[in-house]
């Protein structure tokens, strides 16, 4: 598995066609907005470019008039009075402000809109990915796909577009205008361009490495902090504060050194660009003076040259930064595309597809299963669960208990052998039909932030209060009405303020509300104090009544009343039968039981 | 302020020279428009002198070179100083955290301390670094530019300056607004992130209950909320730059109109007008920075205050001012009427009394929550007692130097935590290697085979970027860490709970054979670990219920007897 670090730092070719192709459908609906944004950017650039031109006109037309006639031509209009010109100029400033503002806002809006759409589609795509995908990838990484990476993409639509369309266009525009005004002088200035380009490419390359080192060191520093906080007992009792502090200081110093290196790079780059700016002024004064003397250049044009050069150098300082932003946006885009390239969990249902509207029996017939096609996790599993029956599965961690559930619920497929529901092979049943009639209660109670109501029947699901309250009552959740605010109790991050036992009861109530035919408990009472465990057991028993149920437990007492008990060890069923039968057998189950009793 | 003062002093010369460089750059920067002015005035009068022109251009290039050198100087010196402050504060913070006591750390959130270490320090660096630069720049560059402009023509300057106060105000207000909106957007974003995290965590439930589309809708709502809040921020951000440009352009308008009028009236020369434009461009930065800087400074000060509060929090457990000096600890431990509770008024332990002789071994057992771990944590003073007193060799714990006390106790906490690094680093904890001892300890902790199977043996990386170890492996490494250095008191909190029965018995018997030469206290549920102890305490509800030898307790204590029977059975049938 590739580490996050590697992925993050991987260099991406700027115009990776595949990434663009894959993301195009997300951009296409907003293409007109992007085009409009681009148009607005162009307009703003034009306005900025016109500014010095106006000043030049003011100089040549009014302030230091060339020739005898006062006044200037703008867009075919002849402006004779200086006052009119100033009126015109103020209108121009105001318009450019409005357009500039509107352009910035619209561009942000466009970017955010695309991002919103991308994020929702990406998330919804991910929810339909098979469970195997979630087991393979750490959840932190998946979360950052939807959160951070999508956020990074936003840069692409704002900074990068501005970079390409505004800064580059403006610089090109400036050169073009300069050539129109005076070819010779403009040519001299163009000689500076290669120096600028080379220095920017060089510096952004060095800077990228510097930034990367700083980022890595900072991550290590943060890690040290959190580690020190978690391991404080050990640090203090082994009296190793000093060595830890020393190690931290070294790390902190490395970060400092990297930062200083970055400062050095900037302290060379920025003054260098600044020097080129000053050099351009000298060139303009030199060449311009000759021009003015030879009357090929007006004084106003000389001033315009100076102002344009200032405009030309302005975006240069941020160019390398934007370049790096673009790189990281592309890296994020590629990671997102990688997720989108995962196919949704699809089910190939054979032609003889059969509908089921209830589950009345489950049969495993010689099922073998492996997650990775190498190590088997289930070998030759056969059992039958008939109407209203319950089955208990016990065994050590790694014995394959949870894999059985993964197969019944269709989280994983690709097994050998047959699984039947109502004597129909599950391959020809739509998995949705099965899940519609199945409820699952897991070891870690899963509650989402929101109200209890939303947790049991998320909005959009049609359930009235009476039904919800009944489900809560059946799930022994009366405490919600007594100490909390009933259906409207707000659940915060991590299930607060409920205790773990209470959370589990809510999960059972959720199962009640859906009135399933099959109910699966996966270690539902592990790590619980005995009082809460009693309550949960009680609710479980109520829920199991009249339904098919599968209970996975590591404690034998939990499954004692099941109709059938499967004892799993080392991927196989070792013993199978009722509690009484297994006790009489005096085999593994019997021994385990004895062990637990004492 | 007192937090950064030492760094000011330490970097005094750097900062001084840095500021000096900046002053020089600022001054040189102001000369260039003057040269331009002269050149243009010469041209507008129609005269032309090649020599003067060469001199002027050469002068400009020369100034440019000088500016570049001094710019390099101030950037390097001032920014490095800012980084130095950052580094120093971070060191202080880390050092302080290491000295904090458990009772304090139980109360604060890890996330808060992390925030101090990251964003607060960053704010301080920004305020200190950029703040300094901006102050000097604003005062010098802004002041000097303004002075020259006023000197050229006071009235024109006054008129040109009209939009400036608005500009400062706008940066300040909008900057504040932007920060506030950014914060709300950030909150919305973390809600969204949490929702996504929850959904992925509960993906199985979502699939079984067919919640896919519903949860997608929820995420869509959250994303839309974030979108809306972000748009608010975007509105302000989009307004800032065009508004700044607008105000600056207004100044330009004034200069053109009134300045142009003045030139026509021959009050000022065309060159002066051009210079005026140049100065206006120079002035833009200090004025924009002024509004921005005040916000930056406010944030930096708030962060400084927060970090100060943390640094000022005195560790609740600390060395006495005049500790009793002992040359050596023999290992006598006495508890006299000791009581303890994590929260006030809620006692976990009460009225504990016992005496342990040097070199003897004590086993502790009892049901969960009976106070075993709380009891032993008091000996290295991870927490202070709330009643009674604990003595070591007859001296009250509180009268001993804390480092001395802890340096004489080998303590293994219940949760076996490994730091990211190599296994060797985790065992040695930054102390010197005694190769022989290390080999012996590895043998005792049954780590030899385990280490041989690992890619790099003792140098295998564990933790975040290393391999993942099982609970039992972690525990054995943690045990090795505890035993590595010979100490007169050894305290182990459930050291073999996650190790399989067979290995556990082996470790215990090897521990017994080893000449520990120390007072030995062990908490365990395994009878095999307790049986050989001189005395065994059975705890119940925060007190010692029974104590005695193995043989005694089998007769007298029900909990012990039952545990014994279970484990007898396990050994016969288990594994």
Image (cartoon, rainbow, N blue to C red):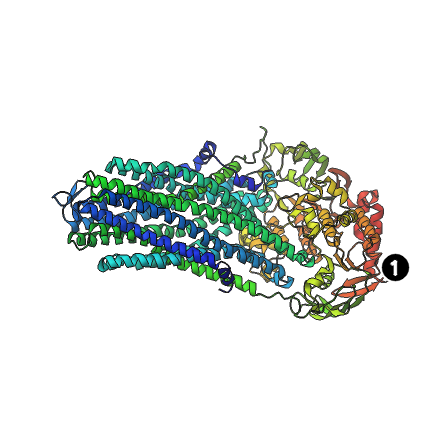
Q: Is residue B170 something that shows in the picture?
A: no
**Residue B257 rendering spot, x and y as whole percentages:** 20, 52
The image quadrant that residue A174 belongs to is top left
Residue A570 vs B124, above or below: the answer is above
Image position of B492 (left or right of B280): right
Compared with B157, B456 (above or below) is above
Q: Residue B498, how many percent across, how many down?
A: 74, 49
Please name the residue that numbered disc 1 is placed on. Answer: B551
Q: Secondary structure at mark 1?
A: helix
Q: Residue furthest left?
A: A68
**Front residue of B154 and B12:** B12
Tell which residue pokes out farthest to the top in this image: A351
Find residue A342 and report its image quarter: top right
Residue B139, x across and y down, in percent: 36, 59
Q: Chain of mark 1?
A: B
Quadrant containing the C terminus of chain B in the rendered view: top right
Q: Position of residue A289 (x, y in %)?
A: 23, 42
Say few, some or many: other residues with alpha carbon within 10 Å of mark 1 (under 14 / 14 to 19 / 20 or more). Answer: few
Q: How many marks?
A: 1
Answer whether residue B527 is visible to the viewer in this image.
Answer: yes
- Classify residue B452 by image quadrant: top right
Q: Residue B280 vs residue A131: left or right?
A: left
Query: At 28% across and 45% down in the image, what residue appears?
Result: B55
Q: Compared to A330, does A237 lie above or below?
A: below
**A323 to the left or right of B518:** left
Q: Would residue A568 appear left or right of A222 to someone viewing this image? A: right
């Amino acid at each position: 598995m590739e580490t996050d670090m590697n992925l993050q730092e991987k260099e991406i070719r700027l115009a990776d066609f595949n990434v663009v192709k894959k993301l195009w459908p997300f951009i296409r609906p907003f293409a007109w907005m992007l085009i409009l944004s681009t148009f607005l950017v162009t307009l703003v650039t034009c306005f900025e470019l016109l500014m010095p031109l106006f000043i030049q006109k003011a100089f040549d037309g009014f302030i230091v008039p060339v020739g005898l006639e006062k006044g200037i031509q703008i867009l075919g209009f002849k402006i004779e009075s200086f006052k009119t010109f100033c009126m015109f100029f103020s209108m121009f400033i105001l318009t450019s402000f409005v357009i500039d503002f509107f352009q910035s806002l619209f561009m942000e809006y466009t970017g955010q809109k695309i991002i919103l759409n991308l994020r929702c589609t990406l998330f919804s795509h991910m929810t339909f990915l098979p469970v195997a995908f979630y087991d393979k990838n750490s959840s932190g990484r998946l979360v950052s796909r939807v959160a951070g990476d999508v956020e990074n993409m936003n840069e692409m639509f704002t900074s990068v577009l501005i970079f390409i369309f505004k800064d580059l266009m403006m610089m090109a525009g400036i050169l073009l205008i300069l050539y129109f005004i005076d070819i010779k002088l403009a040519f001299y200035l163009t000689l500076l361009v290669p120096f600028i380009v080379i220095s920017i490419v060089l510096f952004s390359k060095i800077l990228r490495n510097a930034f990367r080192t700083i980022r890595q060191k900072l991550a290590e520093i943060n890690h040290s902090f959190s580690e020190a906080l978690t391991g404080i007992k050990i640090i203090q009792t082994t009296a190793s504060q000093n060595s830890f502090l020393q190690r931290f200081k070294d790390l902190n110093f490395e970060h400092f050194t990297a930062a200083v290196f970055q400062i050095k790079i900037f302290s060379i780059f920025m003054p260098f660009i600044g020097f080129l700016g000053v050099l351009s002024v000298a060139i303009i004064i030199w060449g311009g003076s000759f021009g003015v003397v030879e009357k090929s250049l007006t004084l106003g044009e000389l001033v315009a040259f100076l102002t344009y050069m200032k405009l030309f150098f302005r975006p240069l300082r941020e160019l390398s930064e934007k370049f790096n932003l673009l790189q990281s946006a592309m890296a994020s885009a590629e990671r997102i595309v990688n997720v989108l390239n995962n196919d949704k969990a699809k089910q190939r249902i054979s032609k003889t597809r059969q509908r089921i509207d209830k589950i009345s029996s489950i049969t495993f017939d010689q099922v073998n299963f492996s997650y990775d096609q190498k190590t088997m996790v289930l070998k030759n599993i056969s059992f039958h669960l008939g109407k209203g029956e319950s089955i208990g599965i016990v065994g050590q961690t790694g014995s394959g208990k949870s894999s059985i559930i993964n197969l019944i619920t269709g989280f994983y497929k690709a097994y050998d052998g047959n699984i039947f529901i109502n004597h129909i092979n599950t391959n020809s049943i739509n998995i949705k039909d099965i899940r519609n009639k199945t409820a699952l209660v897991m070891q870690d109670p899963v509650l989402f932030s929101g109200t209890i109501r939303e947790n049991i029947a998320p909005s959009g699901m049609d359930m009235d209060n009476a039904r919800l309250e009944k489900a809560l009552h059946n799930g022994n959740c009366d405490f919600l009405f007594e100490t909390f605010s009933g259906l409207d109790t707000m659940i915060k991050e991590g299930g607060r303020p409920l205790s773990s036992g209470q959370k589990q009861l809510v999960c059972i109530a959720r199962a009640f509300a859906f009135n399933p035919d099959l109910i699966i408990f996966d270690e539902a009472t592990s790590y619980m104090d005995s009082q809460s465990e009693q309550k949960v057991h009680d609710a479980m028993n109520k829920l199991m009544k009249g339904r098919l149920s599968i209970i996975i437990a590591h404690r034998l007492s939990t499954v004692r009343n099941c109709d059938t008990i499967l004892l799993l060890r080392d991927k196989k069923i070792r013993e199978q039968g009722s509690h009484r039968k297994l006790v009489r057998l005096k085999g593994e189950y019997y021994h385990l039981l004895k062990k637990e009793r004492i | 302020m007192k937090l950064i003062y030492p760094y000011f002093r330490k970097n005094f010369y750097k900062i001084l020279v840095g500021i000096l460089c900046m002053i020089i750059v600022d001054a040189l920067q102001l000369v260039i428009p003057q040269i331009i002015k002269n050149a243009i005035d010469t041209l507008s009068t129609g005269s032309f002198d090649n020599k003067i022109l060469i001199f002027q251009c050469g002068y400009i290039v020369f100034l440019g070179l000088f500016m570049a050198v001094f710019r390099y100087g101030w950037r390097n010196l001032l920014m490095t100083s800012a980084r130095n402050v950052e580094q120093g504060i971070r060191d202080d913070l880390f050092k302080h955290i290491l000295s904090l006591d458990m009772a304090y750390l139980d109360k604060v959130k890890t996330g808060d301390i992390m925030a101090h270490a990251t964003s607060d320090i960053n704010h301080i660096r920004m305020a200190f670094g950029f703040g300094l630069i901006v102050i000097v720049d604003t005062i010098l560059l802004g002041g000097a530019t303004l002075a020259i402009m006023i000197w050229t023509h006071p009235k024109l300057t006054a008129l040109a300056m009209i939009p400036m106060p608005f500009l400062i105000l706008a940066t300040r207000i909008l900057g504040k607004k932007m920060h506030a909106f950014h914060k709300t957007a950030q909150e919305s974003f973390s809600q969204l992130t949490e929702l996504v995290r929850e959904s992925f965590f509960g993906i199985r439930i979502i699939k079984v209950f067919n919640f896919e589309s519903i949860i997608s809708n929820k995420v869509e709502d959250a994303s839309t909320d974030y979108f809306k809040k972000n748009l608010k921020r975007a509105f302000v951000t989009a307004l800032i730059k065009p508004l700044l440009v607008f105000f600056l352009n207004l100044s330009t308008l004034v200069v053109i109109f009134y300045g142009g009028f003045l030139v026509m009236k021959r009050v000022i020369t065309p060159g002066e007008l051009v210079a005026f434009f140049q100065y206006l461009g120079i002035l833009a930065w200090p004025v924009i920075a002024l509004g921005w800087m005040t916000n930056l400074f406010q944030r930096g000060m708030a962060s400084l205050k927060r970090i100060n509060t943390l640094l000022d929090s005195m560790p609740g457990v600390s060395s006495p001012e005049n500790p009793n000096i002992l040359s050596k600890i023999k290992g006598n431990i006495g508890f006299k009427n000791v009581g303890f509770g994590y929260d006030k008024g809620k006692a976990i332990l009460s009225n504990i009394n016992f005496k342990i002789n040097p070199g003897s071994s004590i086993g502790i057992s009892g049901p969960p929550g009976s106070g075993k771990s709380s009891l032993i944590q008091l000996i290295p003073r991870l927490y202070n007692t709330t009643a009674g007193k604990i003595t070591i060799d007859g001296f009250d714990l509180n009268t001993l130097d804390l480092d001395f006390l802890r340096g004489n106790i080998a303590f293994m906490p219940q949760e076996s935590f490994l730091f990211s690094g190599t296994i060797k680093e985790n065992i040695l904890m930054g102390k010197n290697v005694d190769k022989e001892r290390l080999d012996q300890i590895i043998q005792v902790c049954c780590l030899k085979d385990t280490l041989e199977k690992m890619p790099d043996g003792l140098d295998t990386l564990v933790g975040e970027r290393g391999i993942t170890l099982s609970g039992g492996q972690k525990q054995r490494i943690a045990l090795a860490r505890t035993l590595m250095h010979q100490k007169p008191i050894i305290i182990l909190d459930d050291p073999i709970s996650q190790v399989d029965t067979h290995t556990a018995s082996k470790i215990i018997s090897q521990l017994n054979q080893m000449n520990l030469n120390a007072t030995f206290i062990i908490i365990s549920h395994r009878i095999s670990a307790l049986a050989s102890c001189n005395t065994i305490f059975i705890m119940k509800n925060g007190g010692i219920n029974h104590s005695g030898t193995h043989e005694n307790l089998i007769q007298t204590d029900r909990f012990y007897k039952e545990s014994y029977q279970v484990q007898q059975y396990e050994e016969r049938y288990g594994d």
